[in-house]
Amino acid sequence: MTLAAAKAALSHLDIDDNPVSVKAKSRDFFWYSPVLKARLDHITADFVVSPRTEAEVIEVLKVAYAHNIPVTTRGAGTGNYGQAMPLAGGIMLHMRHLNAVKAVHPGRVIAEPGCLVKDVDAATRAHSGQELRMHPSTYTTATIGGFIAGGSGGVGSCTWGALRDLGNIIRLRVVTMEAEPRILEFTGEELHRVSHAYGTNGIITEVELPLAPAYDWVDIFVTTETFPDAARFAADLGNEDGILKKLITVFEAPLPQDYFQRVSPHLQPGQALLALMIAPHALDGFLTFAARYPGARVIYRSDAHDWPRDPGPAFEYGWNHTTLRALKVDPTITYLQVRYAAPDHLDRVEAIRAAFPGEVIQHLEVMQETGSTMFAGLSLVKFTTEARLDAIIRAHEDMGCMIFNPHRYTLEEGGRQTVDDRQLAFKREADPKGLLNPGKMIAWDEPGFDYKTVYAYRGMMPA
């Protein structure tokens, strides 16, 4: 590597080589995991380049290729798996200047990857009363490109499913990492080559996503006396196709009592809590539905303005904002991501609760999966040791609950523990030197890895 030569060749671009700010721009939310924090806390890029155009992206990649410099792409750094951590140093490609909403059409939007999710929604609402189908709980800070490259679903998934589901991404424009970078456009089956690939095999420079009608969603909190009652309420609401909803989240006690400071004064000990987003025209249907559950009580509606302190958006209690709120109170908390598949998702949740009372606290998100309702669990875990955390993970898997492990930084270990042949094949084509976000794709680095041990990238910079 000749870092000095590469930096000199790119000196006319927006470069940051201040060690303090470079380290800050090299970090994502990996510290949600005490396991990743121990392994990645020292990681930093050598310098940051913030391109202003696709042509500048191409220029950066061309120079980096010529000098064998690793390149890791970053949006807002709100991911939790260490996706955007530059394990081998090199260039951090910061996409903050590529932030334009380029076009809004009926049912779709075209945007640059560095555009904040909230700004995409603001533009589409102002233009034609439309909004994104789904977004992360980090709505105000996350970038749309980062969501595509590192996310899997979010607020809206109770109606629209996961990002990987057909129709939830229309088109991606991607630049390759070659001596002469190419510009490629992917649709259909080819989208899976680069979506949720952590920028390991191409740099996204434009996204085209579907839209839905925008509503002034009503945030609602509902209590039940027991957690199984809340989970059943959530599962049934997810199956009510005529009630338009954007969020169905369930919290086991004492999670909301301990960590939701503006909500806890309105809760009784032991009560479970649901956080919901319901379209205004669906409120009558929702209230009729809720009345069928004698133990359920609506304690808050954002359209009533009857709490002395506004609790803020309901979605900022769900997804990984739940973990963030808990960490602010108790820094020993961590979390797991669990797939509770239908049709026995309620039974699986109860089996896990019985196995880990007080140690694994349930937080469920309702999602649609191929036409049926299931639960994505973002369980809070009272962390003691890495060995105990691994034992809890194995127990989940032994009980038929798939873990998407947020304590691993690789694509395979954080996902389904299998090789994605489409992404690997495209990396061979588009990144022949393996310079894009190195260390994140085991299939590239160690094809024979057996997944029986924790993968450790050999090229990681020393602590």
Image: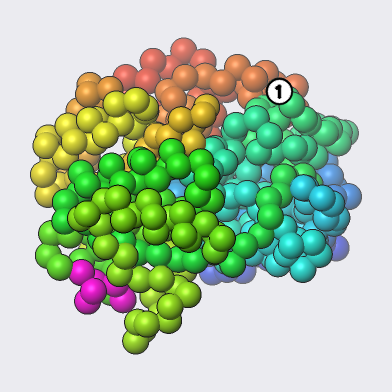
45 displayed left or right of 395: right
Q: Residues within 10 Å of mark 1 (few under 14, many from 20)?
A: few
Q: Is residue 50 visible?
A: no
Q: Residue at x 22, y 47 (%)?
A: 229
Q: Left or right? Give the position of 35 relative to 422.
A: left
Magenta span: 262-267
Q: Is 409 drawn above or below residue 48 in the view shown?
A: above
| Looking at the image, residue 240 lies above or below residue 269 | above
Q: Residue at x 16, y 51 (%)?
A: 226
Kind of residue sitting beneath label 1: Glu
Q: Nearer the viewer, residue 186 or 92?
A: 186
Vertical side of 332 occupied by 301: above or below: below
Residue annotated with mark 1? 189
Q: Which residue lies at the image location 22% right of the left edge and 30% below the top edge?
A: 347
Of the pair 312 and 420, the residue shown nearer to us: 312
Q: Which residue is drawn at the image coordinates 46% and 54% (left, top)?
A: 285
- Residue 241 visible? The answer is yes
